[in-house]
Image (tube, rainbow, N blue to C red):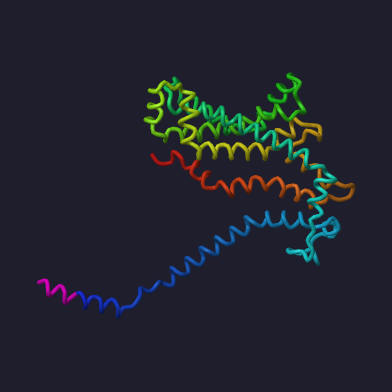
Amino acid sequence: MTSAVADDVPAAVAVSISRGPRRVSGKKILRETLFYIAVAIVVLIALFPFFWILRTSLLSNSQVAAGVGGANGIIPSHLSGVAYKNVFTEASFFTPLLNSVIVALATTVVTIVVASMAGYALARLRIAGAGPILAFILLAGFFPVLAMIGPLFLVLRYLNVLNNIYPLIIVYLVYTLPIATWLLKNFFEQIPSELEDAALTDGATRLQVLRRVVIPVAVPGVFTAAILSFILAWNDFAFAVSFLTSTAHFTAPLAITTFGQSQYQTFYNLIDAAVVIISIPIALLVLFAQRRIVAGLTAGSFR
């Protein structure tokens, strides 16, 4: 019987060789081709506004005044960096950038400190009404921002702190705290409780456990929460335009609205140059930290 099987093996190999490689059906090739064409079209449509902003920012004032056409086609024949120079010299964009850096970094630090304690408490401690608390946090995250501007404006005016960047640090927590708390709570739940039990047995307090044990293990989640908080605070326009009136206190997104204005024309190269400048920090953060962002966002997805 063994010899019979052995005799059949070369025959089967010969048959498979004679048949040659399996042919791919024409319909499958057509479907894959159409799929990749559709993906390419979607990507081009999504990237075209960014390309147009970068293109416009590299035009001179005379090219912007001439409009699109001729030498100013899709790819202009001559590119200039004068708009970037004018943004800092004529428009004094450095001060709004510094204001945005101060507010965004301070908001991120406050958010991470508060959200870490809140997320850890909700993940590990037995709190009465934890479910309604989480539901309230989620509701606060989806509450319309415009509905908060009126009450917050009255509070800031009563405290006499309008037209100041520092109250924005507290106001921006409306953006950042809900998402950071939810993210860190889910991440902390994935950490083995045995690590904390060992530290508690050695006499550490809950805050010491959080600071020395949990946070170092949860670096991807903390990093992701910090990046998201920074982006939300950096890009805010609604609160800034509602509470700031002096150009000396403008943040970068608000300052852009004052650029490029003349009596007869708007020079969009200045506006787009400022947009490119404030987009660079966000792009660099996402580019160099994309693995940590993905790891943090997927925490708690599988249990």
Q: Quadrant of the C terminus?
A: top left
Residue 4 is a magenta residue: yes
Q: In which quarter of the image is residue 140?
A: top right
Left or right, residue 228 beside residue 57 = left
Which sits in the foreground, 232 or 105? 105
Relative image position of residue 224 (x, y in whole percent): 54, 40
Q: Return the residue nearer the eye: 170 or 3.
A: 3
Q: Main secondary structure of the magenta part?
A: helix
Residue 264 placed where, x, y %?
89, 50
Quadrant of the rendered image containing residue 149: top right
Left or right: residue 53 versus residue 186 is: right
Query: Measured along the vertical axis of the image, is residue 162 above or below residue 44?
Result: above
Instruction: Tell me where the magenta segment starts and ends, as one range.
Output: 1-8
Residue at (52, 26) in percent of width and height: 117
Q: In this view, does 73 lie above or below 161?
A: below
Split into 4 quadrants, where in the image is the N terminus?
A: bottom left
Q: Percent from the top left, x then y, of residue 88?
A: 80, 45
